[in-house]
Amino acid sequence: MKRLTVELGERSYPIWIGAGVLGQLPRLLEEAGINNQRKLFIVTDEHVAPLYLDKTTTVLRDAGYMVYHSIVEAGEKAKSLSIYERVMTEALEAGLDRQSAFLALGGGVVGDLAGFVAATYMRGVAFIQIPTTLLAHDSSVGGKVAVNHPLGKNIIGAFHQPRLVAYDTELLKTLPSREVAAGFAEVIKHGLIWDEAFVEWLEQNADGLQRFDDNLLQETLLRACSVKVAVVSEDEKERGLRAILNLGHTFGHAFEALCGYEKLNHGEAVAIGMVAAAMLAEHLGMASSISNRTRRILKQYSLPVVLPYAMEADAIIEVMRRDKKGEGGKLVFVLPTAIGKVEIRKDVAEEAVRDVLCALQEGGKL
Ligand SMILES: NC(=O)c1ccc[n+]([C@@H]2O[C@H](COP(=O)([O-])OP(=O)(O)OC[C@H]3O[C@@H](n4cnc5c(N)ncnc54)[C@H](O)[C@@H]3O)[C@@H](O)[C@H]2O)c1
Ligand SMILES: O=C(O)C(=O)C[C@@H](O)[C@H](O)[C@H](O)COP(=O)(O)O
Ligand SMILES: [Zn+2]
């Protein structure tokens, strides 16, 4: 088991990564100050529940915890106010109080939803992340929790740090291949924004990683999480630096919203968004030869690099104007200047964005 620490003063917390972490949960909870006198409420989804809910509940009950749960539908649609209200109701019915804790057992959807419930239940109680997807190496760390609004991603949310991240790599073995690919989109993002050597390593080890080789997978999680930890420890509430974690997301979140949060998953939308960001950087003369390498590594990990559905450039731009990074409806982009380096740009002309969106739909170059 390997440990990383998010350094945030009194809100600091450990991320435990390794095979068998789930079995250690009672001890890790005790260490995090959550003893077995407290009620625990697990939020999970309908795919994860049949695989891991019994095991998690048993481990905790055997250690003396009182454990309750809520099972939500799988997929992005669960990040909604109506499901948020349902989980709140079930937690109230279970008698959870301010000393209780929520446990997110699942991917980023469950993590964001359960985290937002925890952030607001009786004005905020403890929560624990138990990530079960590769993508959740990103979502389980950093305390951004939210549900979606039909007009935009993660619009209703908070910053609420978990008390502990317990990442059992054994749980990733049941992931469908499309979700493995989605997870690699955020892994690659962490390389592209911060660490060229990590990008090279991912390029060289793509075959082994696609096969989910245990040692390579552990190293991937440690390296990708280390980037996230470094950024969040420096800028918890996105006053500046943290916005770099949004590479590909100004575009990607708009693509997801315009697909009704259905046809493209988050990782796929971010992958196409990172290609768009690289094309935009080249179009603005900020970089050269970035988009080809970005496309190549994404394809190595079976990710899309063009928009597979027709979307109006106007509609995409309208959604992007509601992005949380923007001020006064201005478009804001995280753009690469080299592999491993990005800049935040708030002055990009709409015409340049439109050119990129057209080329992206045609799958062509600018
Ligand atoms: N808070 C953050 O910082 C942050 C960062 C990145 C992404 N996100 C959010 O995360 C969400 C995407 O997360 P995701 O990709 O994990 O999606 P997800 O939670 O929907 O999980 C993907 C699919 O895999 C299934 N699944 C989960 N674990 C499984 C397992 N071990 N075995 C088999 N099936 C399993 C789920 O039921 C679901 O169908 C998006 O809403 C995105 O906005 C948040
Ligand atoms: O942690 C962050 O900060 C990120 O931007 C990570 C992203 O991968 C993630 O999708 C996040 O939820 C996006 O945040 P948002 O503020 O753009 O909604
Ligand atoms: Zn993301």
Image (tube, rainbow, N blue to C red):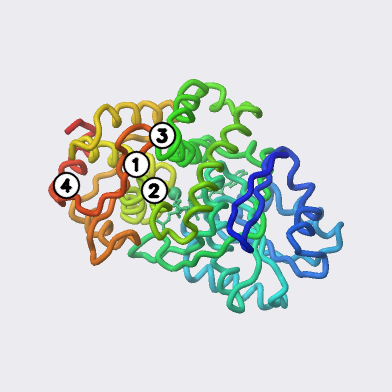
- Judged from the image, the secondary structure of the residue bearing numbered disc 3 is loop
Rounded to the nearest angstrom, the CA distance separating label 3 from label 1 is: 21 Å
Rounded to the nearest angstrom, the CA distance separating label 3 from label 2 is: 21 Å
Q: Residue at x 20, y 53 (%)?
A: 347
Pointer 3 and pointer 1: residues touching (CB < 8 Å)? no
Q: Is residue 193 left or right of residue 138?
A: left
Q: Position of residue 96 (x, y in %)?
A: 70, 75
Mark 4, residues whose alpha carbon is within 10 Å: few (<14), some, or many (≥20)?
some
Mark 4 or mark 2, which has the lower sequence index? 2
Mark 3, residues whose alpha carbon is within 10 Å: few (<14), some, or many (≥20)?
many
The residue at which mark 4 appears reads as: 354
The residue at which mark 2 appears reads as: 244
The residue at which mark 1 appears reads as: 342
Q: Residue at x 30, y 30 (%)?
A: 290
Q: Residue 128, relative to residue 271: is it above or below?
A: below
Q: Position of residue 365 (x, y in %)?
A: 20, 31
Which circle, 3 or 2, is nearer the viewer?
Answer: 2
Which circle, 4 or 3, is nearer the viewer?
Answer: 4
Pointer 1 and pointer 2: residues touching (CB < 8 Å)? yes
Q: Residue at x 23, y 40 (%)?
A: 280
Q: Residue 30, relative to residue 215: is it above or below?
A: below
